[in-house]
Amino acid sequence: MTATRNILLAILLALAAWQAVVLLTGVPPFILPGPLRVAKAFAANAPLIAEHAMVTLTEVCLGLILGATLGMATALHLATSPAARALLRPILVFSQAIPVFALAPLLTLWLGYGLWSKVAMAVLIIYFPVTSAFFDGLMRTPQGWLDMAQTMGASQRSILMRVRVPAALPSLGSGLRLAAVYAPIGAVIGEWVGSSRGLGYLMLLANGRSKTDLMFASLITLGCMSVLFFLAVNLLTRRLDFKAEA
Amino acid sequence: MTDAPGVGVSGHATDGGIPLFSNLAVTLGAGQWTCLLGPSGVGKSTVLRLIAGLETHVAFTGEITTTDGLPTAPRVAWMAQQHLLFPWATILENVATGPRLRGAPPDRDRCRALLGEVGLAAHADKHPHELSGGERQRAALARTLMEDRPIILLDEPFSALDARTRSEMQDLAAKLLAGRTVFLVTHDPLEAARLGDRIILMSRSGTSTLPVPTSIPPRRVDDPEMLDTQGRLYRSLMAVT
Ligand SMILES: Nc1ncnc2c1ncn2[C@@H]1O[C@H](COP(=O)(O)OP(=O)(O)OP(=O)(O)O)[C@@H](O)[C@H]1O
Ligand SMILES: [Mg+2]
């Protein structure tokens, strides 16, 4: 309860500071519109913003589902195959040296201006944190559990599914939470590079037409959406944690 | 359970070319408790792992024999100092770990019966973090019993417990594991004196069998003969280099 109150208080404080800056400096609204102006722009364009927000949200959700699935599959493969570890791991690490954002124009070229180039961008950003978090978890199974399973006559497959995977779920959870933070960034960058829909597109459009208030309204919508998205993923992935003993 | 065999381990081991122990000669009497004492780091857990067929870091030269000629590894249940319960599973599910890992349907009634025997019937649906240290170790004992194996390897399973819980666990284990060939690694002379049908002292240069009290284990904590044995075990343990 106090947490909610503190958050509300912080938001109010930020809005007040924002309004104060606008009033005191007298910046023109096309440089920095006040919160009231932005609120008006939001109200006037609500259906438009909602429509574009839905597009971005779809990209983010699809990106997270696909990226997480690919990441988990890769981690399982790496964890079970020494050959894959020897070959794939250097490639994975090297791929992280390439700034993923630099690939955005290529993705647009290959996948077009539609949804999928943005989903691909989100997938590319999510893939590595999910893979590496889950893989680390799978490789860090306490030796005692593995020994016990062996004396019980468990197969390698059973040890993977019934010991290593459950033991790695909390690590997977932290990877997914990280992915939830990155996914909207990926989608919006994809939209900036080339699109006709989505909040990123709307921001560019508003900016180009000096509708700075609409631009801010879109930006704040994106921020709120990202936070809610993270909270939802956080809530879901917390179920992957198990309680450690005192 | 099939008839418990006697087990013999003899040989020597090197760790990266450096001798760890030599002249090892351990004999586990069929259906008896054998306790292994020895200074820390001498290789007691390693001997246990060899019998269990688990990977070790040493090069072992020697042999592991059984009175019935069958291999030991598929017939052992192994219980360590850590309870090794899965935190994501309930106590009941943890007791059924063996069958679950083998993909066999666990016999729930037997799991519950075993939980009853170790006094955890009321905790079946709790998770390990909701239990005390002693209760967790009892759950681990129930899981070990669920395996119903003739050879039981215990690696200091009670050493993290307080004195009272420890002696209760010793009594419980003695009762529930009767008839099996039990090999107990311990650093506690009292535990060895209470439980051992045979007590072996291990050092780098070899093993020696020490005298045990004449009474039948588990011996009372205030049994004078047992306490006398404890004293002598302490002295022998301190004398080992
Ligand atoms: N996985 C390992 N890798 C390398 N060395 C190890 C490993 N496990 C044990 N050792 C070393 O091998 C020796 C014997 O280990 P072991 O665990 O068998 O001793 P122990 O007699 O059981 O000791 P303690 O009473 O302390 O449990 C020790 O010197 C230890 O440092
Ligand atoms: Mg040890």
Image: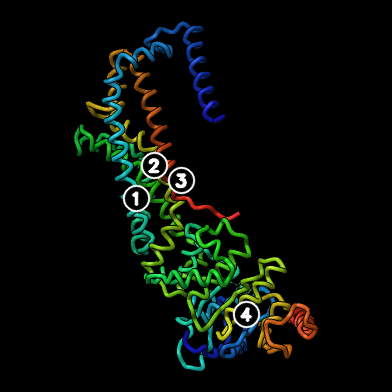
Q: How far is the residue under mark 3 from the one under mark 4? A: 42 Å
Q: Is residue B204 rendered to the left or right of residue A189?
A: right
Q: Nearer the viewer, mark 3 or mark 2?
A: 3
Circles 1, 2 touching at the beta carbon (< 8 Å): yes
Crowd around label 3: few <14 · some 14–19 · many ≥20 (10 Å): some
What residue is shown with label 1?
A71
Q: How far is the residue under mark 2 from the one under mark 4? A: 52 Å
Please identify the quarter of the rendering in which residue B204 is found: bottom right
Question: Does ligand 1 reach within 8 Å of label 1's beta carbon?
Answer: no
Disc 3 marks which amino acid? Arg
Q: Is residue A125 rendered to the left or right of residue B198?
A: left
What residue is shown with label 3?
A238
Q: Is residue A174 visible?
A: no
Label annotation for residue A179: 2
Asked whether the residues under marks 3 and 4 belong to the same chain, the reply is no
Relative to B29, residue B137 above or below: above
